[in-house]
């Protein structure tokens, strides 16, 4: 049995989480519960599940499925998550994308660097 | 300036977070704020800072330094974090280690797999 | 334009390569060209392309497509790569899997640890 | 014993290798042996060993220590690796840095994107 466990640990055992998210989610107006939910969505996407349900998320979190659905709705409204709809071969499907989150982090990082550079030039 | 930003994004831009932590922290009795704090400590350790202060942590979190210190104390008491003390060349230093957390996750995973196997054999 | 580049660097910018592979490929009888080819196949799989062609691989390597095809054939014969065939909805498809490689690495690691333990007990 | 092995697999089990390196080393004039050597140096640096010896590298590669030393010298000459010297507290030390490699990859990527954009505008 151990071999199977070790294989699981070797293959796809980690999720790469951007340092930019860890260092700046709070400055972007997110709290820990919201950030964890975004990390969970990211980890589902990394494993090929592009539309985890509130139940999928609640299974791993301290919130109920209804609270997860609320969180998701709010993060979509605030522009951290997009829902992309596709209609391939008459099959309708939805997928979450975190592109808006990554873009906000890049813009934030860019502005912080620009501000630092200006401050240094003024000195 | 962009080149410097891009270099930052290329080098050490991500932290590898074990899926075992994301999938099981709640079952281990941790909530999102505690899990995020553990991820922050992990990310500091990965960057070579083995003893981030409550101020370091509070800079990135929605808690005050005092609340971070409380969280840390509780996580040490509950056996998720160890503090290792060393005394090299008369220089005293302290370092956090997350080994107890990783060990709990392995044991939890191992038991879950054993239970599943038993359940399958009984069917 | 920079924003698009930075987004690319932030999202899916790295491939996680197991240390076990880097530390032991030579002991397993692989040379650098073969190990790089396995890393390339791994990186294609991580991006969702489960059956990169010899042309895909040759585009990034110092070998011709014919040499890549030879390498692939030999690595399948030697039991490092499997080809899995599926037939879903009358659509036939093939996929590479590196499971045999990961399994060899686990078994090798396991034996090395067992040997070390025995050596220590005998001392 | 298995628990120790699993801990090893969970902690620091992977090295993050930039896709930019995998996709472009050949265009930068590197072959597989040179790229693997750079990945090895990167993996040593990630583990806190900033100056692996030719013996350290030869232990994992199909080349002799003398050949590794040659490779290293050539990669320094060609501007992929820098050697940084420091003199802290009268202790002289040397460290490899891959910054020149990362910078070449960024510049290459930037130019390729600029060329693509120009080509699209001319159409």
Image (tube, coloured by chain):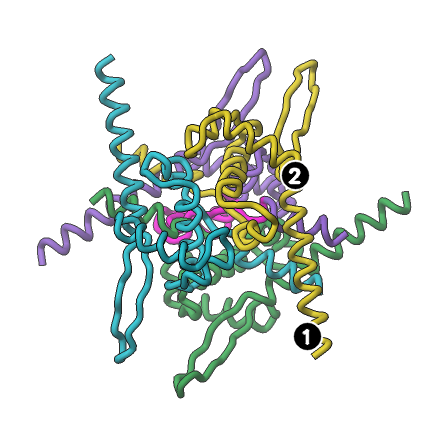
Chain colours: A purple, B green, C yellow, D cyan
Question: Looking at the figure, which quarter contains the C terminus of chain A?
Answer: bottom left
Q: Is residue D105 visible?
A: yes
Residue plotted at (65% across, 39% down): C78
- Res C78 label: 2
- Res C16 label: none
Queried whether the magenta region covers residue D111, the answer comes back as: no
**Residue furthest to the bottom:** B90
B11 sits left or right of A90 in the view: left
Residue plotted at (60% across, 67% down): B100
**What percent of the width, then of the height, locates residue D120?**
27, 18
What's the magenta region? A12-39
Name the residue carrying label 1: C120
Tag 1 subunit: C
Q: Residues within 10 Å of mark 1 (few under 14, many from 20)?
A: few
**What percent of the width, then of the height, locates residue D108?**
28, 36
Tag 2 subunit: C
The image shows a total of numbered marks equal to 2
**What percent of the width, then of the height, locates residue B67?**
45, 67
Front-most of residues D14 and D67: D67
D108 sits left or right of C41 in the view: left
Pointer 2 or 1: first along the chain:
2
């Amino acid at each position: 049995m151990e071999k199977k466990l070790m294989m699981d640990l070797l293959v796809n055992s980690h999720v790469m989480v951007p340092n930019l998210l860890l260092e700046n989610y709070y400055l972007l107006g997110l709290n820990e519960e919201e950030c964890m939910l975004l990390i969970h969505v990211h980890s589902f996407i990394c494993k090929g599940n592009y539309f985890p349900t509130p139940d999928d998320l609640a299974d791993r979190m301290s919130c109920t499925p209804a609270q997860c659905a609320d969180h998701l709705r709010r993060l979509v409204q605030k522009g951290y998550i997009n829902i992309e709809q596709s209609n391939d071969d008459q099959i309708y499907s939805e997928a979450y994308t975190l592109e808006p989150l990554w873009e906000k982090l890049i813009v934030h990082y860019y502005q912080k660097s620009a501000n630092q550079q200006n401050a240094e030039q003024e000195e």
